Amino acid sequence: MISTKNIKSDNGNTKPVLDAGNNKIKINSITFDQTPYDKDAYKIVLHVETEPVEGTFQGFLLDKDNPSGPRHQGQVGRVRFQQYDYRDVVLPSGIEIKRDQSVLKSMVFLAETLDMRDELDTIEAQTIFEFMKACNQIFSNSKYFNACICGREWENNQGYVNLDLFLAKKYKSEVPIEKCDVENSRLINFDPEKHILKLKKKSVTSFESKDSFTGDDFDL
């Protein structure tokens, strides 16, 4: 007799991809990537992984070309260190933003959060690209920490809505990343209404670059 009584649904399985929210993560690697729409703009990307997931969880392969090889034990994801790109720019107020100084400040914040400032200060590099390669060596496979991860919805060519992930912005006394088990947590509490940039459904009137970050494409 055919019956579904002893068949378990797969719908409850934990997906191998990290989602937005308050997550406990570690850094597997850091990359400093040029954006495809502006050769002078870069982004710091944290390639992160959660703590091991128990049960029947099956993570992504460590080596995609070796199907019988080991897998990640936790959920993985690529998280921008901040929502916006790093670039040299002069704001309408007249304030000048320097890309390299902004990158250095971001890495100082990460290092101080993880109690790794001494290691960071040992880096002496000729260019920001060399500096970020050294940061990758220092921070890869470091300790777990807590993070508030936001997301920006985007639609792929198949019509599926995905999330570009990025750390929440520091707000007053609240922080987007924090050591685990601190006595008085200041970690930002994830709120999907505030921290997910929704894709606005609109009729297509012109062809635009899919990589363009235009302000009217999203509702905050």
Image (tube, helix red, strand yellow):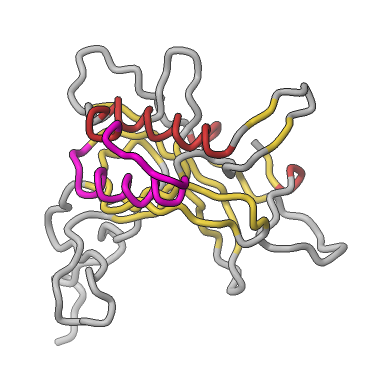
User: Residue shown at 30%/56% (left/top)?
Assistant: 76
Question: Which residue is farthest bottom?
Answer: 1
Give the side of residue 49 with respect to residue 41, left or right.
Answer: left
Task: Give x and y (percent) for residue 39.
Answer: 64, 57
Who is closer to the viewer here, 140 or 10? 140
User: Residue shown at 67%/56% (left/top)?
Assistant: 38
Numbered range of the magenta stretch? 121-144
Who is closer to the viewer here, 38 or 180? 38
User: Residue shown at 15%/63% (left/top)?
Assistant: 56
Who is closer to the viewer here, 150 or 47? 47
Task: Give x and y (percent) for residue 44.
Answer: 46, 47
Give the side of residue 165 with respect to residue 177, left or right.
Answer: right
> How many discs mark residues in the rendered view?
0
Where's the C terminus, which quadrant?
top right
Who is closer to the viewer here, 137 or 150? 137
Task: Give x and y (percent) for residue 167.
Answer: 45, 37
Where's the N terminus, which quadrant?
bottom left
Q: Is residue 125 magenta?
A: yes
User: Residue shown at 52%/32% (left/top)?
Assistant: 101
The vertical placement of 182 against 102, above or below, is: above
Q: Quadrant of residue 179?
A: top left
The vertical placement of 54 against 150, above or below, is: below
Q: Is residue 209 magenta?
A: no
